Amino acid sequence: MRRIPLVILILAVLTVAACSRSKGPPLAGDYPLTRLTDHVYVIHGPNDLPTKQNQGFMNNPGFVLTNKGVVVIDPGSSVQIGEMVLKKIAGVTKNPVIAVFNTHIHGDHWLANDAIRAVHPQAVIYAHPNMRAKAAVEGENWLKLMSTLTDDAIKGTRALPPNMDINHDETLTLGGKHFRVIHTGTAHTDGDIMIEVVEDRVLFAGDNIVTERTARMDDGNFKGNIAAVEAALKVNAKFIVPGHGLSGGREIADAYLVYLKTFYGSVKKYFDQGLSDFDMKDKVIADLKPYQKWVLFDAEIGKFISLAYLQIEAEAF
């Protein structure tokens, strides 16, 4: 009996799933697959916010080939994006997805769990316990937010939280590959994990590191984020995959660390001079001249100053 090629099987399963519930259209556009090593791949999404035009695709889903199957990191923000990731995987290997890592709570990184579990229900989805606890109660809120931002382009997506805890310095052996987890405390959020693919010298940093943009810090801590990037730089990684923006070498972590230290140091300097967050804004912006063209800089800088001010104030008491 002839075996059915996996790509055909996946397309068939996706078709059946599409017929069983009302969904928005597939992800438009052709996003290239970047091969970092013989076993590690990444799909770079637009370095932007979720919009109707990008259908919510703006993170960097990655996957790792192992002897037993495929390990996916941050599959994306919708069932449509997850289906795109599965098609990219099927173009490389016939092996099933055996595991998924979700790096943190923000929905643009994990709502595509839905697509993975629809085709590979046996896949274990790992996350930090803080992330898992929040995903269990905040999933519908993330669906509503992503739906609003994309004009319902994610229609049909279900919030399927991760189902297995993973903690700092745990190493999972999956199909002969070692995946070491790094959690340094509250950084971008209180449940961030970074995943080191040890043999391939690749670090998936989540939003603890982003490239040429600012990252949401409503749920985070600036000093904690600095500590996370410093921890990332201690890893023996040749490639770093950021949560958003292009992957690269250690230079992208160095650049983000300098930005964070410059920003936080600027706010601290003017705090010590007795300025309010409002009064220091123009001075902080001037100190950040090299970063003023980064994605979301103008939209976020006022909020960032207020958040950093409150964190510095709290430390002073």
Image: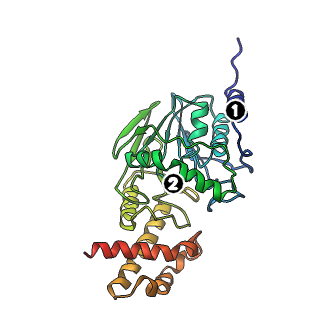
Q: Secondary structure at mark 1?
A: helix
Question: Is 223 on the left or on the right of 53, as rendered?
Answer: left
Residue lying at the far left of the rendered structure: 317
Q: Amino acid at mark 1?
A: Ser
Q: Position of residue 4 (x, y in %)?
A: 70, 21
**209 or 111, which lies in front?**
111
Q: Image point 59% across, 42% down: which residue?
A: 158
Q: Position of residue 172 (x, y in %)?
A: 40, 36
Res 80 → quadrant: top right
Q: Which mark is residue 106?
A: 2
Q: Marks 2 and 1, how far apart in space?
A: 27 Å
User: Where's the N terminus, which quadrant?
Assistant: top right
Coloration of the structure image: rainbow
Question: Is 204 on the left or on the right of 313, as rendered?
Answer: right
Mark 2 is surrounded, within 10 Å at the Cα level, by few (under 14), some (14 to 19) or many (20 or more) other residues, namely many
- Residue 15 appears in the rendering: yes
